[in-house]
Image (cartoon, rainbow, N blue to C red):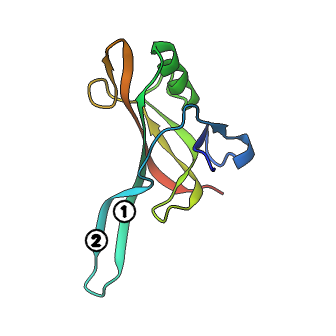
Amino acid sequence: MTTYRVATGHNVVLGSLTVLSPQPRSEGMKYTRVNAAASGVVYKEAPYVELVWDLLADATAYQALLTTFGLGSVESATVTVYIRSDKFSWVRMNGRAVRPEVGRGVTWGRFFPRNITILIRDLETAS
């Protein structure tokens, strides 16, 4: 089974990416805008991926997850991720991880961090 992975910085080699534990769920790479020209050509713009965890063990696990993405003390960070593409193949991409917004990208309920969503935007193929 292939796994989601991440490292801070761009163009990090696959073997140096950290395997995410626990693994997130994700629909794979998506686009903010998809347009079809009159010629029939489809243009896909602004690729992104959302990595989602339903529940983490505690606040320490949440902080560790943020640190893995370089988001321990900043709102966004450059990352290299290993994710599923829009064709469901595994690809290594560069992007910008965005810290979850409290109440929207992460909630606290019944003593646990829940519904954690880390957005990786501005995706481009890693070299």
**Mark 2 or mark 1, earlier in chain:** 2
**Pointers 2 and 1 in contact (C-beta within 8 Å):** yes
Residue designated by label 1: 45
- Which label sits on residue 24? none
Q: Is residue 59 above or below residue 50?
A: above
Taking depth in this image into account, of 55 and 75 the one nearest to the observer is 55
Residue at point 64% right, 37% down? 19
Instruction: Decide if residue 83 is on the left or right side of residue 101.
Output: right
Give the spatial CA distance, label 2 vs label 1: 8 Å
Q: Quadrant of residue 29?
A: bottom left
Q: Residues within 10 Å of mark 1 (few under 14, many from 20)?
A: few
Q: Quadrant of residue 35?
A: bottom left
Which three-letter amino acid code belongs to the residue tagged 2?
A: Asn
Residue 12 in percent (x, y) is at 68, 45
Residue designated by label 2: 35
Taking depth in this image into account, of 10 and 80 the one nearest to the observer is 80
Residue at point 66% right, 57% down? 127
Q: Residues within 10 Å of mark 2 (few under 14, many from 20)?
A: few
Residue 61 in percent (x, y) is at 52, 19
Disc 2, SS: strand
Residue 36 in percent (x, y) is at 28, 76
Which three-letter amino acid code belongs to the residue tagged 1?
A: Glu
Residue at point 56% right, 41% down? 79
Q: Is residue 12 above or below residue 45?
A: above
Residue 57 in percent (x, y) is at 48, 18
